[in-house]
Image: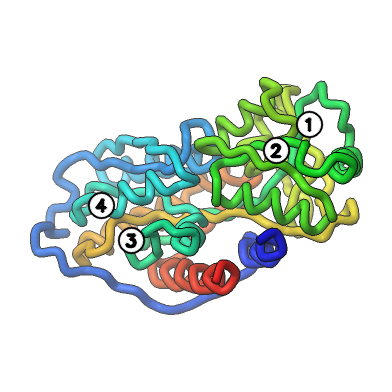
């Protein structure tokens, strides 16, 4: 399994796949795009408030409200490394009033026994990529990645590393890092990146694997020390933090995020929402927040994003199969 996780890392590299294609899942006769939206919307987030997914969703919600002319209520439904939120979203009426942030786990969880797959959603566009970071509390005795890896090698399975949930991308990142370095960590799951970071700050765990946007704030407040970015190159928001590869560990892994809704959205409603999402993700306000957080903002079409998600799902199937 751990060797598979290492191969998985290469599939989740931010910005490495260029895909084209199309997907159209209309068909509901109970909703019309003519006057949509006629009431407020709910935006479902699979992770806890304060994390990278939540930051992305809430930033987009503000931009979407201006375009759609309706309030958007962000609803955090956490648990199961994304299972709870994604399961809830796919079961909502396909009328356009329930939308959601769809993370990389939509391509992973179905191969781990969950009834979750990209085709269960109407994809509206890809909005971001996010590299992983490895951090320790500022009072940690581990001053560098080498220090932490040496400890994990001396006592395999004893160095606790928090992540955003069992089976989720940051657990995969932890296992991939250990595999690449010849070390064994003890992953500790939480319901999202924010509580995973909080566990590191409080000393519940010895290290934290999370996205840049989740760890950078704590590092800025001198609560965490970031040892490495698991990206192809250093990120602009953390220019002083070296990549794992710079430090001799060749591993690159990150997450990504789409916006979507339940499958079966009527074509007109889908197009209205997709246009709004692309406009919101292209806004200077959204791009500024994402860039400062260390993420890569994107604004792809529904067709591109749908094919991207399906391609990722198929590739993760080869890993888990």
Q: Residue at x 68, y 48 (%)?
A: 132
Residue 229 vs residue 80, the one in the foreground? 80
Mark 1 lies on residue = 225
Residue 30 position in % (x across, y down): 9, 58
Rendering coords of residue 220 (x, y %) = 72, 27
* Residue where numbered disc 2 is placed: 161
Q: Relative to 39, is 259 on the left or the right?
A: right
Precedes in sequence: disc 4 or disc 3: 4
Query: Horizontal placement of 282 versus 25: left or right?
Result: right
SS of the residue at dot 2? strand
* Mark linked to residue 91: 4
Q: Secondary structure at mark 1?
A: strand
Q: Which residue position is annotated with label 3?
A: 121
Query: Which quadrant of the view contains residue 159?
Result: top right
Per the model, the C-alpha gap separating discs 4 and 3 is 10 Å
* Contact, mark 4 vs mark 3 (Cβ under 8 Å): no
Separation of disc 2 and disc 4 at Cα? 33 Å
């Amino acid at each position: 399994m751990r060797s598979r996780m290492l191969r998985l890392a290469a599939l989740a590299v931010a910005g490495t796949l260029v895909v084209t294609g199309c997907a159209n899942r209309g068909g509901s006769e109970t909703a019309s795009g003519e006057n949509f939206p006629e009431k407020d919307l709910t935006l479902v987030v699979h992770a806890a408030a304060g994390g990278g997914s939540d930051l992305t969703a809430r930033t987009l919600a503000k931009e979407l409200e201006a375009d759609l002319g309706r309030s958007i209520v962000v609803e955090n439904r956490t648990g199961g490394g994304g299972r709870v939120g994604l399961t809830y979203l796919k079961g909502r009426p396909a009328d356009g009033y329930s939308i959601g942030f769809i993370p990389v786990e939509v391509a992973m969880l179905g191969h781990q026994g969950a009834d979750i797959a990209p085709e269960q959603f109407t994809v509206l566009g890809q909005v971001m990529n996010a590299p992983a970071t490895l951090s320790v509390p500022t009072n940690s005795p581990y001053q560098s990645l080498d220090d932490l890896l040496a400890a994990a090698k001396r006592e395999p399975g004893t160095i606790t590393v928090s992540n955003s949930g069992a089976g989720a991308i940051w657990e995969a990142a932890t296992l991939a890092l250990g595999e690449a370095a010849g070390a064994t960590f003890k992953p500790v799951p939480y319901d999202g990146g924010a509580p995973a970071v909080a566990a590191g700050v409080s000393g519940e765990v010895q290290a934290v694997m999370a996205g840049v946007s989740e760890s950078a704030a704590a590092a800025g407040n001198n609560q965490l020390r970031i040892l490495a970015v698991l990206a192809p190159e250093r990120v602009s928001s953390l220019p002083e933090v070296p990549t794992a590869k710079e430090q001799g560990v060749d591993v690159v892994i990150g997450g990504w995020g789409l916006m979507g809704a339940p499958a079966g959205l009527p074509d007109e409603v889908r197009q209205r929402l997709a246009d709004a999402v692309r406009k919101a993700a292209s806004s200077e306000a959204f791009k500024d927040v994402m860039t400062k957080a260390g993420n890569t903002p994107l604004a792809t079409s529904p067709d591109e994003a749908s094919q991207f998600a399906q391609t990722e799902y198929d590739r993760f199937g080869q890993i888990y199969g």
